[in-house]
Image (cartoon, helix red, strand yellow):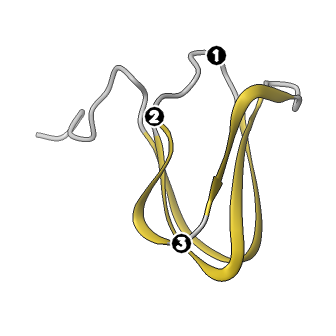
Amino acid sequence: GMTLNAKTAPDGWIKAELLDSVGRPCPGWQQMFRGDSLNGKLFNQLPKEPFRLRITMRNAKLFAIDCIASNQSKKAGKP
């Protein structure tokens, strides 16, 4: 899935949109975020094919984005 660490003003927002490999919007892959979160959920899972991410913001601060493939866990690769 995909999560973010972000904070928006009361009138602010963050839009996350997945695009295909040539930059066309993928239908159904758009989410809006408002609020203040260390682990705000954008997408529960991600497409298997390559994609681009477009972020558009208004009156917002984006600190981090975390992407985890569906077949991995956050602990994968750690001893």
Extreme residue in the front direction: 10
Tag 1: amino acid: Glu
Q: Pointer 3: what residue?
A: 35
Q: Nearer the viewer, mark 2 or mark 3?
A: 3
| Residue in the picture at 75% in, 67% down | 57
Q: Pointer 2: what residue?
A: 44
Residue 69 vs 8, above or below: the answer is: above
Of the residues under marks 1 and 3, which one precedes in the sequence? 3
Quadrant in which the C terminus is drawn: top left
How many neighbours does mark 3 have within 10 angstroms: few (below 14), some (14-19), or many (20 or more)? some
Of the residues under marks 2 and 1, which one precedes in the sequence? 2
Tag 2: amino acid: Asn
Q: In the image shown, does 76 or 9 lie closer to the viewer?
A: 9
Residue contact between numbered discs 2 and 1, judged by CB atoms under 8 Å: no
Residue 32 vs 2, above or below: the answer is: below
How many neighbours does mark 1 have within 10 angstroms: few (below 14), some (14-19), or many (20 or more)? few
Q: Which quadrant would residue 27 be assigned to in this image?
A: top right
Q: Seen in the image, is 6 located left or right of residue 75?
A: right
| Residue in the picture at 67% in, 22% down | 50
Disc assigned to residue 49: 1
Inter-mark Cα distance, 2 to 1: 16 Å
Q: Seen in the image, is 50 located left or right of residue 1?
A: right
